[in-house]
Image: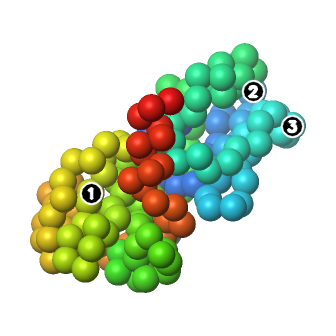
Amino acid sequence: MAKRVAGSLKHVLRVSRVAWYYGDDGTRAYVEMPYGNVRGLIAVNGKKIINLRDDGRDEFSPDVREKILSYGVALDAGWSCREEAYGMEINEAMRQSGYHHAVRHHDGRLAIQTVDEHRCTIFVDGEIRWTVKIHQAHTVIEELGLSMADGWYPVEKDLFKHYQVRRQA
């Protein structure tokens, strides 16, 4: 049976793509995070208030946070989910990523893209952190407390260009 996780919305979304909110005043909310071309949503008391799309960011924009708060939904407590096991093994995700050979971990903080046949670059929170030999990347991943066996998704964009554009914005 899956373990139940509770706390802030950010904490809950680290282990699941969906989260439920149960406020003390009876307010109920539901968040389903987007993935790839599949849109997500935020609903409060059964009414959809926001459509979400995967823009590569780790957290909601200030406008989205403000809208959630305007409905009386807290972001720092009251959220829960069942812990999910999702994603795939890193090498399988890399094979599926196509031209750019890039993957991201489901927690959103870590992404990796190959530079050439022998090296890859590891991004943490959208910033280049290391460029290492591919066969040494597992050491960095394990030191960050992540598994190579699951939780990885293919990325269909050039992360070098994507993160460069974000830094300039």
Q: Which residue is drawn at 62% across and 50% down?
A: 54
Which picture quadrant has residue 11? Answer: top left
Left or right: 21 with respect to 140?
A: right
Distance from disc 1 to disc 2, alpha carbons, whole Å, reads 43 Å
Residues packed near mark 1 inside 10 Å, few (<14), some (14 to 19) or many (20 plus): many
Residue nearest the viewer, comparing 72 with 22:
72
Residue nearest the viewer, comparing 93 with 65:
93
Q: Which residue bears the numbered disc 2?
A: 26
Q: How many labels does the image show?
A: 3
Q: Nearer the viewer, mark 1 or mark 2?
A: 1
Residues packed near mark 2 inside 10 Å, few (<14), some (14 to 19) or many (20 plus): few
Q: Which residue is drawn at 39% across and 53% down?
A: 160
Q: Which residue bears the numbered disc 1?
A: 122
State whether residue 5 appears in this view: no
State whether residue 162 appears in this view: yes
For residue 111, above or below residue 135: above
Q: Which residue bears the numbered disc 3?
A: 47
